[in-house]
């Protein structure tokens, strides 16, 4: 919102959420009906009317490609313009980036009905295309410049334009984040060339499409937070600097506010003396880039289900900023062809890790690297060696860079810091002590008996919990390892009546069915238990709240809420903060549970109390 919202701030369909797309259904339905009626009657087909919806879809795809490119390049690039944190508030503020595309579709359908020159428009008209170019370079750019300057007067700025300028770290979609009233003025400006072609009988489908895509392209390119325009373009054609802006040029407008007002052509800033004097210098510095900071911590993660790729930082921004929720069957079916193509590309053409995120906590620099493989591929004998090679390659690369700690998430339990001790500490100190019914001293273990399961069982027995397990072989192994004085706390039992279950991977649906009503299912694995009972309580996987000083956090980690991080990832960060260089944690070599828990709290990580999902 603007700092002092004025009239026509909210978009008409703001309360509808994603249901706003349903508003297009009558227009699309009428368009399809009109096409078949004309075809059956042997009449001329109104191709412009039929092309509006494909244009709408093309613009959505174009926007998403810029979103993905920007997120990917921002985390990879050494050519950042503004090196500041991106947060959830900006992601939420910019979540309605598609409103202006939807509005354009409504306007085009309306124009097709009321303007005679638009109905039955041809595919191409050279004269019309030239009119669009000339009118954009003249009246549109000129009027936009002065309107933009007016928006920076305190009266209009506080009521409208301050909403756009809330984003200092710009992204492509920042360009279209405006209050409704302000966006309507922009539409009137951009309509000048299009209305002129309509009234002169020169409107054409390709010309309109190219103009809309040009506006989108320049808007998105100019709001990237990295420089993309190569310098040799200006060297080959020097006047181009007056006809095309660059991301660094417009970024100065977002940081300095009173300079570089032009739409796409800096020409008017040069004429009226509002050109920021540091524009050229910033452009050259961004192209040169700067040396990247060597991360202190690397966290290795991977894709889970097929649709998890949409939840990555360079996937769908709105999905990435919320906990992972499986798509509905209809949505999964509609996206399946695209999802399948993405899966083929990832598994066949991505042979090394990708950088997903860069974060900072005080002076500690962190990165998350993605192993481009799905979790089901970890179970494949064919893919297993390839995945291990990728993990080893990532570890080798990190060590050569001078990385202090590598933590491993999800199924990447190979070596270095696997976070077992902190995950155990979270289960003990957050869930068992604060969430389940008070006085609970009896728990059942179900699922695979991993190293973490063993350590958790030892810790529970040490704290005088009665631990029930149903695996006879595991019971014998544990009884041999556990100290004599704690053996009474470890019992063989096939009962399902205990109120608290500690569950790992491999718990079967039929086991859940046998649990008593009100049972607490507490996972000690990195994957949550699939909910099968509405009358039982399901907890999240071990996790902690991150400190407020943790920077550049704008995505959710898998199925966890905002600013909540898995214990395994937190463990790697704590190891680096504490400087435990000789405390590699994997296999049987684990850190003391109380020691790592106290260290995490000391560095500002907090217990995640709302553990119920």
Image (cartoon, grey):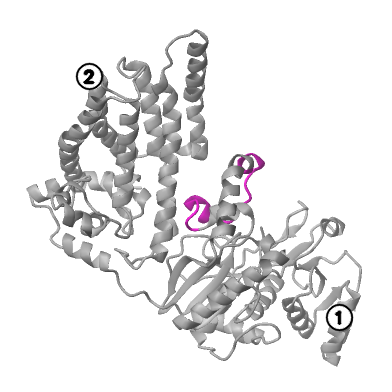
Prevailing secondary structure of the magenta residues? loop
Q: Which mark is residue 490?
A: 1
Q: Position of residue 232 (x, y in %)?
A: 22, 58
Element assignment for label 1: strand
Q: Which mark is residue 99?
A: none
Question: Closest to the observer: 90 or 174?
Answer: 174
Which quadrant of the structure image shows residue 468? bottom right
Residue span colored magenta? 313-332
Question: Closest to the observer: 51 or 466?
Answer: 51
The answer to which of marks 1 and 2 sits earlier in the sequence is 2
Question: Closest to the observer: 288 or 494?
Answer: 288
| Residue 427 versus residue 123 in the image, above or below | below
| Residue 221 versus residue 181 in the image, above or below | below
Q: Residue at position x 67%, y 60% from top?
A: 612
| Residue 223 versus residue 102 in the image, above or below | below
Q: Residues within 10 Å of mark 2 (few under 14, many from 20)?
A: few
Q: Residue at position x 84%, y 91% from top?
A: 485
| Residue highlighted by disc 2 | 200
Element assignment for label 2: loop
Q: Position of residue 221 (x, y in %)?
A: 31, 50
């Amino acid at each position: 919102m603007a700092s002092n919202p004025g009239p026509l701030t909210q978009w008409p369909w703001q309360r509808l959420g994603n249901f706003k797309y349903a508003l297009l259904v009558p227009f699309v339905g009428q368009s399809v009906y009109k096409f078949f009626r004309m075809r059956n009657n042997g009449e001329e087909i109104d191709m412009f009317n039929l092309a509006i919806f494909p244009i709408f879809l093309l613009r959505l795809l174009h926007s998403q490609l810029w979103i993905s490119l920007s997120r990917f390049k921002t985390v990879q690039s050494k050519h950042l313009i503004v090196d500041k944190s991106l947060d959830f508030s900006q992601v939420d503020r910019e979540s309605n980036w598609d409103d202006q595309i939807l509005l354009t579709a409504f306007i085009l359908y309306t124009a097709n009905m009321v303007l005679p020159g638009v109905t039955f428009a041809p595919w191409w008209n050279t004269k019309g295309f030239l009119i669009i170019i000339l009118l954009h370079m003249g009246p549109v750019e000129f009027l936009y410049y002065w309107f933009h300057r007016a928006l920076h007067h305190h009266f209009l700025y506080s009521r409208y334009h301050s909403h756009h300028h809330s984003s200092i770290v710009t992204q492509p979609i920042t360009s279209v984040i405006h209050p409704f009233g302000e966006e309507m003025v922009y539409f009137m400006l951009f309509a000048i060339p299009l209305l002129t072609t309509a009234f002169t009988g020169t409107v054409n489908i390709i010309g309109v499409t190219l103009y809309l895509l040009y506006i989108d392209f320049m808007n998105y390119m100019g709001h990237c937070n990295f420089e993309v325009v190569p310098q040799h373009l200006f060297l080959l054609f020097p006047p181009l600097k007056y006809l095309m802006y660059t991301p660094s040029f417009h970024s100065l407008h977002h940081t300095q506010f009173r300079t570089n007002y032009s739409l796409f052509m800096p020409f008017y800033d040069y004429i009226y003396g509002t050109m920021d004097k540091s524009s050229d210098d910033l452009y050259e510095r961004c192209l040169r880039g700067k040396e990247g900071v060597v991360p202190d911590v690397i966290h290795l993660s991977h894709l889970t289900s097929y649709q998890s790729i949409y939840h990555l930082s360079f996937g769908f921004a709105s999905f990435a900023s919320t906990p992972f929720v499986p798509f509905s069957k209809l949505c999964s079916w509609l996206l399946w062809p695209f999802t399948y193509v993405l899966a083929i590309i990832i598994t066949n053409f991505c042979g090394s890790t990708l950088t997903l995120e860069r974060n900072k906590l005080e002076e500690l620099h962190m990165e998350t690297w993605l192993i481009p493989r799905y979790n089901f591929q970890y179970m494949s004998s064919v893919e297993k060696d390839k995945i291990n090679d990728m993990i080893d390659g990532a570890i080798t690369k990190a060590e050569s860079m001078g990385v202090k700690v590598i933590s491993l998430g999800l199924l990447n339990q190979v070596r270095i810091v696997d976070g077992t001790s902190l995950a155990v500490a979270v289960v003990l100190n957050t869930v068992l002590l604060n969430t389940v019914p008070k006085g609970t001293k009896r728990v059942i273990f179900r699922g695979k008996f991993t190293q973490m399961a063993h350590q958790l069982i030892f810790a529970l027995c040490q704290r005088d919990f009665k631990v029930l397990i149903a695996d006879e072989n595991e019971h014998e192994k544990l009884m041999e390892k556990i100290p004599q004085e704690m053996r009474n706390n470890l019992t063989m039992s096939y009962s399902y009546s205990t109120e608290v279950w500690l569950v790992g991977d491999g718990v079967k649906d039929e086991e859940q069915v046998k649990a008593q009503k009100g049972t607490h299912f507490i996972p000690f694995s990195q994957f949550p238990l699939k909910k099968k009972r509405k009358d039982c309580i399901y907890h999240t996987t071990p996790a902690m709240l991150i400190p407020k000083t943790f920077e550049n956090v704008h995505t959710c980690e898998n199925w966890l809420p905002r600013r909540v991080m898995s214990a395994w990832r937190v463990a790697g960060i704590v190891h680096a903060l504490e400087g435990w260089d000789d405390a590699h944690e994997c296999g049987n070599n684990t850190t003391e549970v109380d020691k790592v828990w106290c260290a995490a709290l000391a560095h500002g990580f907090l217990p995640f109390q709302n553990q119920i999902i």
